[in-house]
Amino acid sequence: MVPRQTSRDLRNESRFEVLRALFELGPSTRQEIARHTRLSTATVATLVTEFLSEGVLRIAALERRTVGRPYERLAIDPDRGRIVGVDVAETYVAATLFDIALTPISHGEVTLDEHENSQAYVVDGIVRAVEAAVGTGAGEADRILGVGVSMPGQVSPGAGVSVFAPNWDWHEVKIEELLAQGLRIPVYVDNPLKAVALSEMWFGVGRVADSMAVVNLGTGVGAGIAIDGALIRGANNNAGEWGHTLLQLDGRQCRCGRRGCVEAYLGVHGIETSLAEIDKDHPALRQPLQRDFIDAVATGLAAGDPVLAELARRTAHYLAAALGDLVTLLDIPYITLTGWTSTALAEWLVPAVRAELPDHVLPGSLPDLTVEVSRVPGNPVALGMAAFALEHFLGRLGLPSPASAPIARRRTRPQS
């Protein structure tokens, strides 16, 4: 049963709407915020007062009128503090330091040995990446308000636990507790699919549409999903594990233990398997690291390698079929591709997927269906995790703004 919303829930959601409006609009008057959010001017005035009192907002400018009081143009105060967003994958940890207006300031990255999966090793990599991002500037570490850390696999944010990370064989790891000991800063952990969906909602196609899937292609694959402006989590925070849905009955072995999963064809190991089926002696298969393999494929495609052209055709075929199921199930108008595999191979995959999708999607869901590479700037996982960390900082102030479950927003607006 879905719990009933209380007046406090609605107030918290309204705070989120005000904050999100300022991210979308930039410096705005109370009246502009009210029009954008469709909240009453009285509600906006009350919430703005709360934000101003905690230093989250500042008066950016005063605009004079011929009569009456001047308009106050409000903005998020970037000097209120710093937030760190961390993208943890099987092959790297990337940390970005943001101000609370979510403008990136600095970056730190640590390479992980994809064959090493101990908890101590991964936690040490995360701590070192955060330290590299924060740096040694005078007092910078003291300004950190929180750290948001994405962890691959199934994550329970409320418990701070990595429930199951199949590529590391982790089970019920108390990752938030381990990180809090190492960082000594408030830590929030979540799944990267939720982070990329949130970053797309705030800074990508969420500005023109309320329903979308953000498909991440890398070591693993998955989809962050938003419907009617709400981030879809599911009962156990596992919504979006599209990579472990069925693409081929009794197909390839997947590392989750099942056969025929989408990930077994579209994760990096799946793409390697496809290439081995075409040409088991291809030189790209000699690359020992996953990202080097994908880079070699991209380089070969650019050079016109016919074997890699066939690999791209097969991969696009698998991707179109898997995305077709996602569109048919959810009736979503936007799919954005993110992740390092998407970035490297988009030039070859996206046109082929667009051409083939009509063969896999019911006609009623085809009009205006858009498939494109995400245009969210920087690292969308780190950005989304920083937004979650900001939400939790506001919660500690008594100003919670549930980024994970916003109210249904405005109807879809045409893209300018």
Image (cartoon, rainbow, N blue to C red):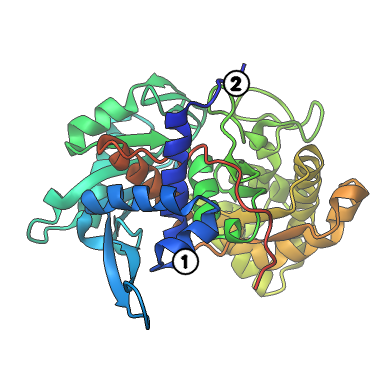
Does residue 403 lie above or below 64 as drawn? above
Choose top left, top right, bottom left or bottom right for residue 172: top left
Judged left or right of residue 280, residue 102 is: left
Badge 1: few (under 14), some or many (20 or more) residues near its Cα, within 10 Å?
few
Judged left or right of residue 381, residue 305 is: right
Q: Which residue in the rendered view is the most extreme toward the left?
A: 138
- Residue nearest the viewer, comparing 282 with 170: 170
Determine the secondary structure under disc 1. Answer: helix
- Residue nearest the viewer, comparing 362 with 291: 362
Q: Amino acid at mark 2?
A: Val
Query: Would you name the residue on which mark 1 appears?
Result: 25
Residue 402 seen in the current view: no
- Residue nearest the viewer, comparing 326 with 245: 326
Q: Residue at x 36, y 26 (%)?
A: 160
Query: Would you name the residue on which mark 2 appears?
Result: 2
Judged left or right of residue 389, residue 223 is: right
Give percent across and percent down for residue 41: 45, 54
Residue 304 seen in the current view: yes
Does residue 413 lie above or below 71 as drawn? above
